[in-house]
Amino acid sequence: MRRPWSLLQLAALLVLLLVVAVAAAEADGADVIDPKLKPTKPEQPKPKPTEPEQPKPKPTQPEQPKPKPTQPDQPKPKPTQPDQPKPKPEPQPAPDAGKPTPKPDPTPKPKPGPSKPKPPVVGPGTPDKE
């Protein structure tokens, strides 16, 4: 008796069928791959320069040092208002800090429902109760 196909064999067969189907569709001229993803112009190799780049001559003028400012550093003026300590807000106790937690009432409450039972609907297919 022949053994069943393994999952790997089935996956390989599926991939092979997909590749063959895409190749056949593109051979017929169908756009299987989104045209937005395809490059519009094939990349052309850039022409290489025939002349090797020659280094540009540097300017012959020597760099002149910039004159430094002659003003001495002046100390910054201090603010005239002295630092005042900010008052800290007093911590307020939680409103239920000393009270025990109320437990839920164990007695079941009746569910709200219709106050009066509805009369049975008597129609052409229901027998009369007399």
Image (cartoon, rainbow, N blue to C red):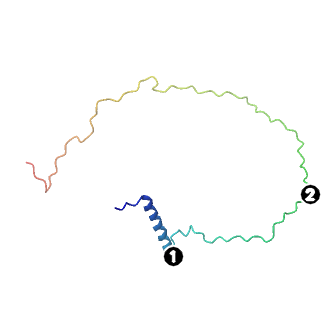
Closest to the camera, between mark 2 and mark 1, is 1
Tell which residue pokes out farthest to the top in this image.
98
Residue farthest bottom in this picture: 28
Q: Is residue 94 left or right of residue 106?
A: right
In terms of depth relative to the viewer, which is nearer, 62 or 96? Answer: 62
Which residue is label 1 attached to?
A: 27
Disc 2 residue crowd, few under 14, some 14–19, many 20+, Cα 10 Å: few
Q: Quadrant of residue 60?
A: bottom right
- Picture disc at residue 79: none
**What is the x, y in percent for residue 51?**
81, 70
Residue 86 in the image: state x and y as whole percent. Answer: 65, 28
Q: Which residue is mark 2?
A: 61
Question: How far from the left and from the top, in percent, is residue 105?
Answer: 32, 29
On screen, 85 above or below 48? Answer: above
* Left or right, 104 with reference to 70: left
Q: Residue lying farthest front?
A: 1
What is the C-alpha distance between the residues marked 2 and 1? 67 Å
Count of marks overlaid on the render: 2
Residue 40 found in image quarter: bottom right
